[in-house]
Image (cartoon, grey):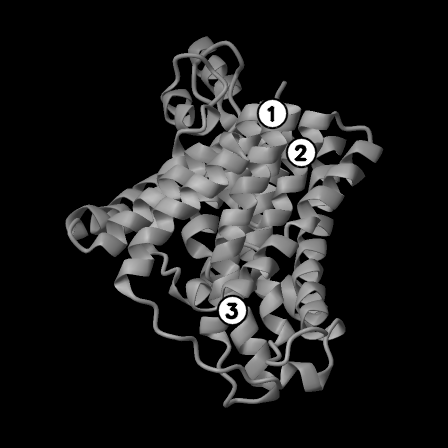
Amino acid sequence: MQIFIDFLGSTGFAQMTFSHALMIIIGIVFITLAITRHYEPLLLIPIGMGVIVGNIPYQPGTMALSVYDEGSVLRFLYFGVEKGVFPPLIFLGIGAMTDFSTMLSNPKLVLLGAAAQIGVFLTFFGALLLGFTGAEAGSIGIIGGADGPTAIFLATQLAPHLLGAIAIAAYSYMALVPVIQPPIMKLLTTREERLIKMAPPRVVSRRERIIFPIVAFLICALIAPASLVLIGMLFFGNLLKESTVTERLANNARHALIDIVTILLGFCVGASTKADTFLNAESLKIFGLGALSFAIATAGGLLAAKFMNLFLTEKINPLIGAAGVSAVPDSARVVQVVGQQEDPTNHLLMHAMAPNVAGVIGSAVAAGVLWSVLGK
């Protein structure tokens, strides 16, 4: 009987607290949104399941189960997140599936991807005002880049104790792109601006596509050497794709490799959100600042496009500025949807991909700058 009583005391039911139950409900909500609303299911389902797994309570000191327990299986899997191994591998896959042709055909649209990074730096100052340290503020600000791997990578270098909250915030807002961005886009543009049609992009030669990843890497890495890991893997993957002589490697990078790493990254990030370390005032502040950062980044891209139109004879549709955040390709799809609500014959997707992929580069460079300045 004593053995039976001891067993009952060791079960998760006996150890369950309100905080654990709340986190499990949050994990279920993530999974529900992914399945019913199709909000980034490739991310939210692994994260949601990880949240549930990471919040099953057990008697502390009796077993090594969580990502924070030395020697546990989850701890070994979490190594790829904690040490920043997974994000560069995801960038390799992103590079192997990204077509930079639209950006090369209209280089001035790169400025929209750069302008969207204003959300990163304004949120950085906002986090400082709320009492976060410089390193913590930099890690929080990068959420505005809408790039989960970049946010995780920078957090591992500057503020590993905030990694769980920053990762969940970054991926949550990436999943909510179709909800967050349209109201901002409509608020900051007129109907006449949303109706602007743009000329089809020019055809980019194979030579340009091959030279670009090499030259772009050299420029970005020399500007911000701390970005060379992410940028290097991004452009390495793109070179595998564009060279056309390593199709087998490119195919593995953009399918098998990125899928495996995404599963492990999402699950481990979710499992790191233990109730006793995640549910606190700091996490709430991070979520609030993350939302602000994302909104400012979207507005920055839109307003930059409107400003550019003051000097351009061939106007650009300001909506594509919203794609300057690097939530590839969801923000570009949102631009297409909002544009076609005004005019079903207006096709903005390919134009929006230019600032969208520029935003990927911009967020990685911004992370490199923050790491260089704040990591000392």
Q: Amino acid at mark 1?
A: Leu
The numbered mark, 3 or 2, whose residue comes first in the sequence reads 2
Residue closer to the observer: 278 or 161: 161
Residue 360 sits above or below residue 53 on the image: below
Label 2: state its secondary structure. Answer: helix
The numbered mark, 1 or 2, whose residue comes first in the sequence reads 2
Label 3: state its secondary structure. Answer: helix
The residue depicted at 62 percent of the width and 41 percent of the height is: 142
Q: Which residue is mark 3?
A: 352
Q: Is residue 55 visible?
A: no
Picture quarter with the C terminus: top right
Q: Position of residue 366 (x, y in %)?
A: 59, 41
The residue depicted at 44 percent of the width and 34 percent of the height is: 228
Residue closer to the observer: 345 or 355: 355
Dot in front, 3 or 1: 3
Q: Position of residue 211 (x, y in %)?
A: 32, 52
The residue depicted at 57 percent of the width and 89 percent of the height is: 343
| Label 2: how many Cα within 10 Å (few below 14, some 14–19, many 20+) | many
Q: Which residue is mark 1?
A: 158
Q: Amino acid at mark 2?
A: Gly
Label 1: state its secondary structure. Answer: helix
Q: Which residue is mark 2?
A: 138
